[in-house]
Each structure stands twice: as structure tokens, then as C-alpha cells.
Image (cartoon, helix red, strand yellow):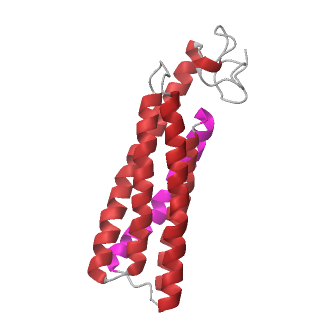
């Protein structure tokens, strides 16, 4: 039997079925042992990625905000605010994935709450970035930053593409919308880091 073209597991009937409650054929579907093991492995990968992402976000939050206050850099403070929102989102996604890792899959309501919460946080990034840009334009504020703050931004440019690719891939494989949304937030962090570095080069 060839593997499912949609999810890659050893069953053919998983295309429209991801949880036991939607399963039309327990003998050959998403509650089949082969598919469950396949999905649990990928959810485990997602959990590890979110742990890595949250650890890096902690570095960005404390580093960017701390160095931003010391250097008087609004650019670093805005970058730290963006990172704080992503950290909160990452913790929510991580909690959801840990609940989803249970074979019972009885956390559908929690999963829906996680989706709404991460979507809200994604939209919360828009005013953080937009207001920061408007404030800098009106006041003519230069994007100054400390050397250590710049080092954090360079680290984000290196780490964020990897996190984005992994979150997007695992989110697609497991149909985890919160993880896919968190991938978009990783891209936002990458753009913020590039803007910070670009501003320094332009000064």
C-alpha cells in the first residue's frame, strides 16, 4: 500500500481526516495506529521547535529591552516588544501542542482557543510595528542600538529562518493552525531584525 499523499503516513484515507472524531474508517484512517504514531512524532518535533523558539525569544526580550533601555534605543525597545508578543504566542502554541500530544485528543476546545489567541497576537504585532514606524518618522528618531543589541538582531536573522521553515512544515503536516500562525510571527521577527540592522547601516 502506498503512503498517503497528503500526510505521508502509511494509510490512504487520511486526506480528509486528522482526528478520531472525524474518522470514517477506524480500520484505515486517522485513528489507525500507523497514522497516530506518525502524527505523534511530528507533534513531538513541533514541541521541540517551540521550546527552542521560546528560549530564543527570552533572549530577545530581555536582551533587546534591557540593552534598549541602557542605550536609549527606541528601535531595540520596539524589537523587544515584538519579541515579547511572539514569546507569549509561542508559550500558548507549546501548551496546545503538549495537550495535542495526548493520544486521547480530547482537547478540541482548547485547540480552538489557542487558534483564536495566536491569531489575536499576530494582529497585535501590526500596531506595535506600525506605531513604532510612525513615531520614529515623526520624531526623526535614529535607530541607534548597542553592540550587544545588534548582536541579538544578527542572531535573529540567523535563527528565525530556520524556525519559520520548521514551524510552517510541521504546522502543515499536522494541520496545526496555531503553529502555522507562529511561523508567520517568526517571519515578522526576521523582518524587524533586518530593519534594525538596515537602519544601523544607513546611519
**Residue 191 occupies quadrant:** bottom right
Q: Is residue 69 left or right of residue 84?
A: left
Q: Is residue 10 left or right of residue 149?
A: right
* Range covered by the magenta-colored residues: 146-175
Task: Kindly identify the residue that appears in the image at 43 percent across and 44 percent down.
Answer: 92
Q: Is residue 152 left or right of residue 37?
A: left
Task: Kindly identify the residue that appears in the image at 51 percent across and 75 percent down.
Answer: 131
Task: State whether the magenta stretch is mostly helix, strand or loop.
Answer: helix
Whole-percent x, y for residue 196 in the image: 47, 76
Task: Kindly identify the residue that appears in the image at 59 percent across and 15 percent down.
Answer: 31
**Residue 71 occupies quadrant:** bottom left
Assess whether residue 92 is covered by the magenta stretch: no
Task: Kindly identify the residue that appears in the image at 68 percent across and 22 percent down.
Answer: 14
Residue 69 higher or lower than 180, as above or below:
below
Whole-percent x, y for residue 58 in the image: 33, 57
Residue 6 higher or lower than 189, as above or below:
above
**Residue 94 occupies quadrant:** top left
Residue 118 higher or lower than 97, as above or below:
below
Assess whether residue 171 is covered by the magenta stretch: yes
**Residue 202 seen in render:** no
Amino acid at each position: 500500500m502506498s503512503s498517503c499523499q497528503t500526510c505521508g503516513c502509511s494509510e490512504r484515507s487520511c486526506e480528509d481526516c486528522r482526528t478520531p472524531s472525524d474518522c470514517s474508517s477506524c480500520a484505515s484512517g486517522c485513528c489507525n495506529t500507523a497514522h497516530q504514531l506518525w502524527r505523534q512524532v511530528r507533534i513531538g518535533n513541533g514541541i521541540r521547535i517551540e521550546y527552542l523558539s521560546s528560549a530564543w525569544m527570552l533572549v530577545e526580550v530581555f536582551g533587546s529591552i534591557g540593552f534598549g533601555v541602557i542605550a536609549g534605543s527606541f528601535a531595540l525597545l520596539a524589537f523587544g516588544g515584538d519579541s515579547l508578543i511572539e514569546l507569549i504566542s509561542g508559550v500558548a502554541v507549546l501548551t496546545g501542542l503538549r495537550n495535542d500530544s495526548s493520544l486521547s485528543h480530547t482537547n478540541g476546545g482548547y485547540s480552538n482557543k489557542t487558534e483564536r489567541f495566536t491569531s489575536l497576537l499576530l494582529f497585535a504585532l501590526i500596531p506595535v510595528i506600525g506605531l513604532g514606524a510612525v513615531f520614529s518618522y515623526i520624531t526623526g528618531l535614529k535607530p541607534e542600538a548597542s553592540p550587544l543589541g545588534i548582536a541579538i538582531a544578527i542572531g535573529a536573522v540567523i535563527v528565525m529562518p530556520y524556525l519559520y521553515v520548521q514551524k510552517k512544515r510541521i504546522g502543515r503536516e499536522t494541520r496545526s493552525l496555531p503553529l502555522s500562525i507562529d511561523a508567520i510571527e517568526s517571519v515578522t521577527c526576521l523582518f524587524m531584525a533586518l530593519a534594525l540592522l538596515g537602519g544601523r547601516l544607513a546611519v
